[in-house]
Amino acid sequence: MSNYEAGRRLEYRVRDLFRRQGFLVIRAAQSKPIDLVCIRRGRAFLIECKAGRSWLGKDRKRELLGFAEQAGAPVILARRRRRTVELTNLADGQSLDPKNLLSTMPL
């Protein structure tokens, strides 16, 4: 499986995870500037997905945190680990529970 296919597969998996919890999910074409935008109750998450051996460089992390500030929404890094999805707030490194996303929504 190519990196593109692995990344797209993870994006769809994360999209479905958020949709099951009632979020409107928008997938960006060619993952620019962010992979997914998830919105519910007037609040949003910006999602950056990294599959396989892809990594997040310092410049890209700085760029994503700039988007978070501009949008007033946290950037969540989604990774596939041991057949599960791991979600981490990019700003503070806090893990999010994929089964209870509403409790982690910003106020």
Image: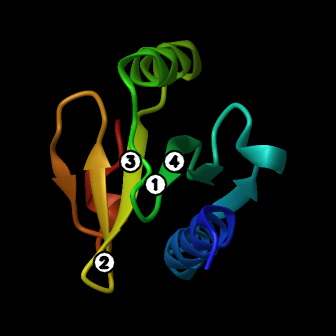
**Disc 1 + disc 4, Cβ < 8 Å:** no
Label 4: how many Cα within 10 Å (few below 14, some 14–19, many 20+):
many
The chosen color scheme is: rainbow
Q: Nearer the viewer, mark 1 or mark 4?
A: 1
- Res 47 label: 4
The earlier-in-sequence mark between 2 and 1 is: 1
Q: What residue is rendered at 49% in x and 13% in y?
A: 66
- Quarter occupied by residue 12: bottom right
The earlier-in-sequence mark between 2 and 4 is: 4
- Res 99 label: 2
For marks 2 and 4, give the CA distance: 16 Å
- Amino acid marked by disc 3: Leu
- Observer-nearest of 103 and 69: 69
What residue sits right under mark 3 in the picture?
77
- Res 61 label: none
Q: What residue is rendered at 34% in x and 63% in y?
A: 101
- Amino acid marked by disc 2: Lys
For marks 3 and 4, give the CA distance: 6 Å
**Disc 2 + disc 1, Cβ < 8 Å:** no
- Observer-nearest of 81 and 88: 81
Residue 86: percent from the left, percent from the top? 28, 65
For marks 3 and 2, give the CA distance: 16 Å
- Quarter occupied by residue 79: bottom left
Q: What residue is rendered at 17% in x and 38% in y?
A: 93
